[in-house]
Image: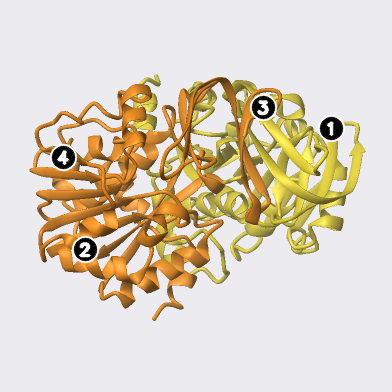
Chain colours: A orange, B yellow
Amino acid sequence: MLNENNWFTEVYPKNGSALSLEVKAKLHEEQTPFQHIEIYETAWFGKLMVIDGCTMVSDRDNFLYHEMMTHPVLFTHPNPKTVWIIGGGDCGSLREVLKHPEVESAVQIEIDERVTRLAEQYFPDLCSANSDPRAQLLFIDGIQWVKDAADGSVDVIIVDSTDPVGPAEGLFNQAFYQECLRCLRPDGILVQQSESPLFHMPLLTAMHQTMRNAGFPPTRTLFFPQFIYPSGWWSATMAGKGDLGGFREDAARAKSFSTQYYTAEIHQAAFVQPAFFSDFMATLA
Amino acid sequence: MLNENNWFTEVYPKNGSALSLEVKAKLHEEQTPFQHIEIYETAWFGKLMVIDGCTMVSDRDNFLYHEMMTHPVLFTHPNPKTVWIIGGGDCGSLREVLKHPEVESAVQIEIDERVTRLAEQYFPDLCSANSDPRAQLLFIDGIQWVKDAADGSVDVIIVDSTDPVGPAEGLFNQAFYQECLRCLRPDGILVQQSESPLFHMPLLTAMHQTMRNAGFPPTRTLFFPQFIYPSGWWSATMAGKGDLGGFREDAARAKSFSTQYYTAEIHQAAFVQPAFFSDFMATLA
């Protein structure tokens, strides 16, 4: 919502806090069949996309989220050739994935085509790899896509979704994780955005437990800053069909593309667990 | 400021953003000779101290700042026996410092006694080490204290100050750093809160340059999340009279006290530089 002084505010009611961004202009607003989308020109964060009242992506700080949703999992997997991105309609994760020359096919499965069309219009940088011949953009239900897919047909699944309410709710349950496990090749890895370690530890521990209940042997969380998400501190959680201990460190050090946040050292640092997080993990079955 | 719905808001005007916390009650407000202090009971963050309109410390998330201002520097120094805390009137850094059994003397030099008196009343947990016989609480000007101190008289100086405007401004310049360097023993280390890597890179790079101009050979920044500070991502910068590459890792792993965030692994991870930060550092003389 915008107040009378033209500031957009997102309230985190369960955590008694709110983030506000100064807006110079509202560029677009629409109700799609799935959600409400707004695009703003902000004073400092560049363009901002808001979905159902939640800040999704800004020019200024999206590099943190998109780099950390993609490069850690791709340099953990021994040989990622095929990648699915469930959600990710702003195409920023797709762009990062396609920086990896070993990726032969990246399919973005976004339920709401309007997210991508608006990203193409207002966030052209994020969409700069959309015409890569390895990219395929589908606008269908990611849950159904995974259900219909053949066993052992993908190396990496990136769940780049909104919060676990509304259209994304079905991406956070055991049935979905079981289908992902089935679709992954032997070394396959699922990675999912997993909310804030400061605000959402119950969700985070439940996610680990649900992934393990679904049959994933190892799960690991990585941490990174992301100001425009609740608490400014965010996480992604990996679940591996095989081992998650791998790291193609030489490849990460020698990567042929530039990043603003990710480095081989950041890769390793991001997986380090805060003391309170280790305590939570110790309670898991 | 509180709005009509009882939310406290701190605006970051240069960065077009603002943080708001839901307030249940204003517990105290006063103008001291140095600054304006407010104490709130918040809905989710416990008690909150605000100085000159800026959130300083909350029950809920101060562990991040206080642990990262103290344990990394104390486990980097080979044998920290004497510690000065410049500022730090809420006594949270003092409490963390005194968890280290090798510390023989910790002097907190806070210019505004009211900060500490209010902390004793509203944040008793942070003040639980104030009566430790190794602790000395002084309410004088930290800049003058350092000027008056003998050469080579301290192992670790922790500058736990407000932002570099108002009373703390003199804690961010070359003259102050030169005095600190003079007061440090041969292995001595200065550590200072150094603002946000997302919002304040010009200040951060200037701090490194100024510390080096003052004669400190090495400088290093460490990073940690801190929601109630601007951008939710914060830093501390160390300057060493000798080497900064040391880490008493065995001691950190075997530490006799508990922490919520800091671990030996977090110590090492916190020093890892994001790619953009390394680029900035490469521009320093």
Q: Residue at x 29, y 74 (%)?
A: A214
Up-down relation of residue A190 to residue B218 (above or below): below
Q: Position of residue B224 (x, y in %)?
A: 50, 46
Mark 4 residue crowding within 10 angstroms, few (<14) / some (14–19) / many (20+): some
Q: Earlier in the sequence, mark 4 or mark 2?
A: 4
Q: Quadrant of residue A108?
A: top left
Mark whose residue sits in front, 4 or 1: 4
Q: CA distance from mark 3 to mark 2?
A: 56 Å
Q: Nearer the viewer, mark 1 or mark 2?
A: 2
For disc 2, the marked residue is A147
Could you give the CA–CA distance between mark 1 and mark 3, rounded to whole angstroms?
A: 14 Å
Instruction: Identify the residue at image location x=44%, y=48%.
Output: B270
Q: Work out how far the residue at label 4 is from the one at label 1, CA to CA, in angstroms.
A: 58 Å
Q: Chain of mark 1?
A: B
Numbered disc in front, either 3 or 2: 2
| Residue with the most extreme front position | A33
Q: Amino acid at mark 3?
A: Pro
Q: Can you identify the residue that label 4 sits on?
A: A136
Looking at the image, is A88 positioned above or below residue A166?
above
Compare marks 1 and 3 and give the one earlier in the sequence.
1
Between residue B186 and residue B57, name the one nearer to us: B57
Identify the disc placed on residue B164.
Answer: 3
Q: CA distance from mark 3 to mark 4?
A: 50 Å
Could you tell me if the residues under marks 3 and 4 are in contact, i.e. CB atoms within 8 Å?
A: no
Along the line of sight, which residue is nearer the eye, B150 or B7? B7
